[in-house]
Amino acid sequence: MDADRRLYPRVFADLSAQANKGSDQFPVQLVNLSLSGFQIEGGGQLAALKADAGKAGIELSLDFQLAGKTLSSLCRVVYKRRMSADRAALGLKIISMDEDARSVIADYVQSRL
């Protein structure tokens, strides 16, 4: 079964973004997005991220520009993949995002299907 089973379709993106975990900030590239999450790529420091004490997963915020608007979302890391010694990819599930940001993403995705 090769059919994509995603509830929300994802589309390619090539956007500069900033991932934030506590006071740490990481420049990243947002490589695809959907209404449920993102894939980002960045330096090896992404692969070194660890969950806060007492938390089961890693949470971070992601800020980026889309359609002339600055969007922010709180995300949970659902996978980490080391691409090389100094590159990593993270799959992020959106935990919270305001409705305006969700609408901008929906329009962006729909226009690229």
Image: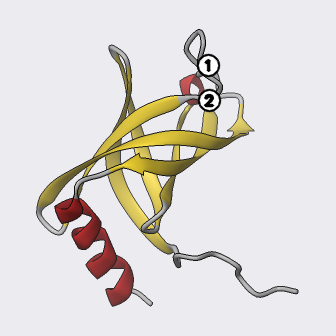
What's under tag 1, amino acid-wise? Lys
Q: Residue at 48%, 72% (x, y): give it.
A: 12
Determine whether, in the image, residue 27 is placed left or right of residue 67: right
In depth, the one of 85 and 111 nearer the eye is: 111
- Position of the C terminus, as image quadrant, is bottom left
Quadrant of the frame with the N terminus: bottom right
Q: Position of residue 29 (x, y in %)?
A: 43, 48
Q: Closest to the observer: 87 or 4?
A: 4
Q: Residues within 10 Å of mark 2 (few under 14, many from 20)?
A: few
In this picture, residue 8 sits left or right of residue 23: right
Instruction: Answer above or below: position of 58 versus 9.
Output: above
Q: Amino acid at mark 2?
A: Gly
The reply, left or right, for residue 89 in relation to residue 12 is right
Q: Which residue is mark 2?
A: 57
- Relative image position of residue 40 (x, y in whole percent): 50, 48
Report the residue at 45% width, 42% height from top.
Answer: 75
Tag 1's secondary structure?
Answer: loop
* Residue shown at 52% from the left, 51% from the top: 93
Direction right: furthest residue = 1
Q: Give the spatial CA distance, label 2 vs label 1.
A: 8 Å
Q: Position of residue 97 (x, y in %)?
A: 30, 51
- Image disc number at residue 50: 1
Mark 2: which secondary structure?
loop
In the rendered structure, are the residues bearing label 2 and label 1 in contact, judged by CB atoms less than 8 Å apart? no
